[in-house]
Amino acid sequence: MDEAYIDFGGESAIPLISTHPNLLVIQTLSKSRSLAGLRIDFALGLRPLIEALERVKDSFNSYPLDRQAQLAATAAIKDEAWFQTCRRKIIASRESLVSELETLHF
């Protein structure tokens, strides 16, 4: 399940992982943490599924995380206040756009 935009609304499928052994939830720091271009993503699933992915990841992962990307990800995750501020601004901007489009009968 692609949850790239989960931080901007919606309900995560993470709680379903325990009852669906083939469910893989994928999230990214590109959108809500403003780290586009660094390709910092992660997958959540039951241990057997994650272990299977670990065995084959090097054959298709052409974007290994370098030290700078790791530091940026760590800083972005730790700064919850900044994340929440940016998140609120993005949601407000989206809602404003929707409102304006509705006035144009879209």
Image: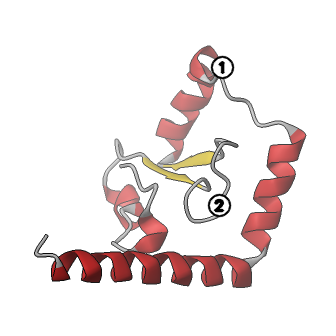
**Residue at image location 46% in from the left, 55% down from the top:** 4
Figure check: 71 above or below 64: below
The residue wearing badge 2 is: 34
- Looking at the picture, which amino acid does disc 2 mark? Ser
Figure check: 95 above or below 40: below
- Looking at the picture, which amino acid does disc 1 mark? Asp
Whether residue 40 sits left or right of residue 93 in the image: it is right
> x, y percentage for residue 44?
51, 51
Dot 2 or dot 1: first in sequence order is: 2
- Secondary element under disc 1, as helix, strand or loop, is helix
Local packing at callout 1 (Cα closer than 10 Å; few below 14, some 14-19, many 20+) is few
Mark number displayed over residue 58: 1
**Residue at image location 39% in from the left, 75% down from the top:** 94
Whether residue 38 sits left or right of residue 54 in the image: it is right
> x, y percentage for residue 11?
34, 72
**Residue at image location 62% in from the left, 82% down from the top:** 84
Figure check: 73 above or below 102: above
Distance of label 2 from label 1 (alpha carbons) = 26 Å
Nearest the viewer among 34 and 106 is 106
